[in-house]
Image (spheres, rainbow, N blue to C red):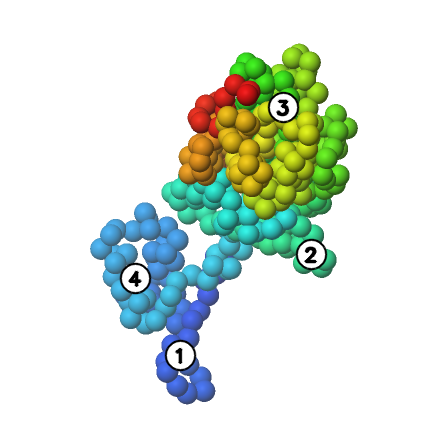
Amino acid sequence: MTSPPPDGHGSAIVAFYGEVSTGTGGDVAARVTLQTIADRVGVSRMTVSNAFSKPDQLSAALRSRILAAADELGYVGPDPTARALARGTTGTIGIVLTSSLRFAFTDQVATRFLGAIAEELAPTGLAITLLTSADSGAIVPARDLAMDGALIYSCDPTSSVVEVLSRRRMPLVYVDQDPVAEVSSVNVDDRAGARAAAQHLVDLGHRRIGLLLSGLHGPHGVVDPGTLPADGHASRQRLLGWQDALRPAGITPPAVRQDGTGLEPARHAAHLLLDRPDRPTAVLCFSDVVAHGVLQAAAELGIEVPHDLSVAGFDDNPIAVQVRPALTTVRQDVEAKGRAAAAALTAAIAQSRTTGDITPQHVLLPTGLVVRDSTAPPP
């Protein structure tokens, strides 16, 4: 994948730094330019420019004098838009999320992931712009906002945002997405983790094991897990992992699919799975939030966990040790995933600037089963 210079941005562009007005009244305020500061300090205009854009070119003492004069004159610094135009960069990367940006602030796994990205990017000076993958009519942030690159994180596979960003030919990194050869990707081994959780329940002696899945698109409610449509990389890989362990044991699991990943939909879906004569003795859940919903539904139905029902989650979300009983779950290193995603994107951006060619990286992080108090042998 290559990333050509932005339209009209050539190496011959000369940096232009914006001017600001000073003064408290009058129809025409005095204009402060780099030349104004240069005249005050007695240096060239380029020296003043370097004080803002190339500080290593000046002595600390001279740069301090220039910045002090700029402050005295009311100059706030180079115009960011003009500087981005001159450099051919924006200093910003996009993170494309699911259909709602609220997810970034309410889901503890997402917030840990984003925090790790921010920490990794801090030394680079790159800023983060959060984008939604939902289409909004004429407003398409993924198409219209200036960015140096983008992370595409666990997005709805039916969204057009990936195609839009690909057409912009900017550096991309897929996270929790189906990997493709030409684009860098960071995933966790969802399938192996899900297989370990299912095998744990089989080894405990469970044979009536239910599945509680999540999906943005239908069908929802009681479903046949063998005929479900593809609805996201993590969902598909976790389902495959469960089946890897259940099929050899001769287990055909009942399954319920909820709309989204929230606690309330999970509680409702859990009732569909548990409030039945042939209820399972164990439930494998898409996430720890979903598992929390199962714990709530079990309590409402008078089902004791783990004596009557074993529950296994996924993610090792902080909620896993906050609920009672503490959840058996599959741990993914969310911070490592965030750091790896940021590192892969900064590497891709650097390569696109220097050679125009990007060598994709494909990272697969391990998962591991964490056994706590929510699983036990069947009654």
Q: Which sits in the foreground, 93 or 339?
A: 339
Q: Which residue is mark 1?
A: 30
Residue contact between numbered discs 3 and 4, judged by CB atoms under 8 Å: no
Which residue in the structure is indicated by mark 2? Answer: 136
Viewer-side label of 1, 3: 3
Q: Amino acid at mark 3?
A: Ile
Asked if residue 70 lies left or right of residue 355, the reply is left
- Which numbered tag is attached to residue 67? 4
Asked whether, in this view, residue 373 is left or right of residue 267, the answer is left
User: Of label 2 and label 1, which has the lower sequence position?
Assistant: 1
Three-letter residue code for mark 1: Ala
Mark earlier in primary sequence (3, 2)? 2
* x and y, in percent, of residue 227 in the image: 77, 28
* Circles 4 and 2: CB atoms closer than 8 Å: no
Identify the residue at the far bottom of this view. Answer: 26
C-alpha span from label 3 to label 2: 41 Å
Q: Is residue 123 left or right of residue 265?
A: left
- How far apart are the two marked residues, 3 and 4, measured between alpha carbons? 68 Å
Q: Measuring 64% from the left and 21% from the top, which residue is drawn there?
A: 208
